Amino acid sequence: MDDYQFACYYTDCPRRYNTKFNLQRHINTQHLNIRNFQCDFCEKRFPSKQNLREHNYIHTNEKPFFCKYEGCDKHFRQSSQLAVHHKIHKRREEPAQPLLPDICVERQLQCPRLPLPASLSNPL
Ligand SMILES: [Zn+2]
Ligand SMILES: [Zn+2]
Ligand SMILES: [Zn+2]
């Protein structure tokens, strides 16, 4: 018994569906090119294929966006989540405090214990 009785009526398209709704959705997305991407697994719709693909990872349990930093094995479903995560690494790379010698060059009188750079020790 063939449940997929709703065949797509577009030429050269072999797709068949078990409900009229599924067929209409297929026609809207595949043939009418409506920018309205619906998830195959749930009722959510997305404005772009990329959005839908990233959403689909929720259903397939894939996390294809992985952190490129060494020693970090975090994976994410969405590129935006990965971008947020990368900020954590970037923040760690930046020194929290300005380097001390730079401050001391400006305030040498207040910081007598640190030696001055050679270029500044003998001002002309
Ligand atoms: Zn079709
Ligand atoms: Zn979904
Ligand atoms: Zn990471």
Image (cartoon, helix red, strand yellow):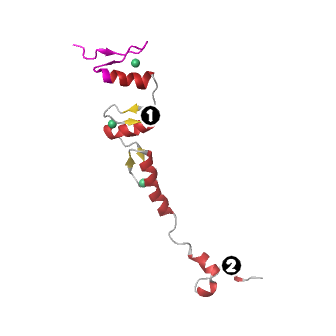
Which residue in the structure is indicated by mark 1? 49
**Residue 40 higher or lower than 70, as above or below:** above
Alpha-carbon neighbours of circle 1 within 10 Å: few (<14), some, or many (≥20)?
some
> Dot 2 surroundings within 10 Å: few (below 14), some, or many (20 or more)?
few
Q: Which quarter of the image is occupied by the N terminus?
A: top left
Which residue position holds label 2? 118
**For residue 80, which numbered disc appears in the image?**
none
| 89, above or below 15, in the image | below
Q: Is residue 17 placed above or below 97 in the rendered structure?
A: above
- Rounded to the nearest angstrom, the CA distance separating label 1 from label 2 is 60 Å
Circle 1: element type: helix
Q: Nearer the viewer, residue 44 or 67?
A: 44
Residue 15 in the magenta stretch? The answer is: yes
The answer to which image quadrant residue 9 occupies is top left
- Residue range corresponding to the magenta coloring: 1-21
Q: Which residue is at 49% across, 59% downward?
A: 90
Residue 44 shows up from this direction: yes
**Image coordinates for residue 105, horizontal then vertical, percent:** 64, 79
**Viewer-proximal residue among 65 and 30:** 30
Taken as a whole, is the magenta stretch helix, strand or loop?
loop
In the image: residue 17, left or right of residue 96 = left
Mark 1 is on which residue type? Lys
How far from the left and from the top, in percent, is residue 35?
46, 31
Say if residue 67 shows up in the picture. no
Q: Is residue 72 above or below residue 15?
A: below
